Image: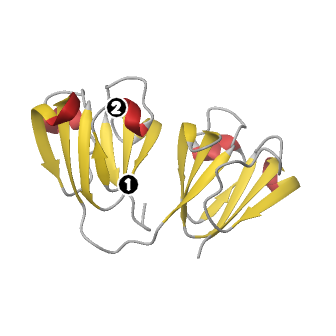
Amino acid sequence: MGKIIFFEDRNFQGRHYECSGDCPEMQNFFSRCNSIRVESGCWVAYEKPNYAGYQYMLHKGEYPDYQRWAGFNDCIRSCRMVPPYNGNYRMKIFERSDFTGQNLELNDDCPDLNERFHTRDISSLNVMEGYWILHEHPNYRGRQYFLRPGEYRRHIEWGSANTTFGSLRRVTELN
């Protein structure tokens, strides 16, 4: 069981909301989010209700202002706990939709997709094992996209407006 606390103001001040599981709508509990404390577990916070908008991977620790979690703004409207996972990691990325075009199977972190895959275009993917974060830019920077096990036939299915990505990382308790 995990625990995360959202605060309206920086440095863990103001009204707060404590969460211990997935929450698709948090607007009734606080109007803005400027700091977060993750007491246990690994979480994904979302800018919009129902797990939409910007996504932020949060590990155990303190985030005294939204820049610390690479926030684009002070808006958090839903969150999801990443289940504890100790198994293998395996996914296959595809250049085109519906699992077509050039493809590559991965089982570890990739700081530069263009270097390894020879393109930055990923239009579909199949997460066979583990939980992953796809990043907009190389070296795990830019917008983040949380990927659970399953098939994603098009980039919009994981919440992206485009198909250009720079890096990919496994979600572990260490990162």
Quarter of the C terminus within the rendering: bottom left
Q: Which one is nearer the viewer's eye here, 29 or 45?
A: 29
Relative horizontal placement of residue 82, taking residue 29 as reference (left or right): left
Q: Quadrant of residue 59?
A: bottom right
Q: Which badge, 2 or 1, comes first in the chain's sequence?
A: 1
Residue on which disc 2 sits:
155
- For the question of whether residue 64 can be seen, the reply is no
Residue on which disc 1 sits:
148
Question: Height in image: 63 above or below 95?
Answer: below
The amino acid type, in three-letter code, at marker 2 is: His
Q: Which one is nearer the viewer's eye here, 38 or 64?
A: 38
The amino acid type, in three-letter code, at marker 1 is: Arg
Task: Provide the secondary structure element on which disc 1 rests.
Answer: loop
Question: Height in image: 120 above or below 15?
Answer: above
**Label 2 Cα neighbours within 10 Å, binned few <14 / some 14-19 / many ≥20:** some
Question: Height in image: 34 above or below 7?
Answer: above
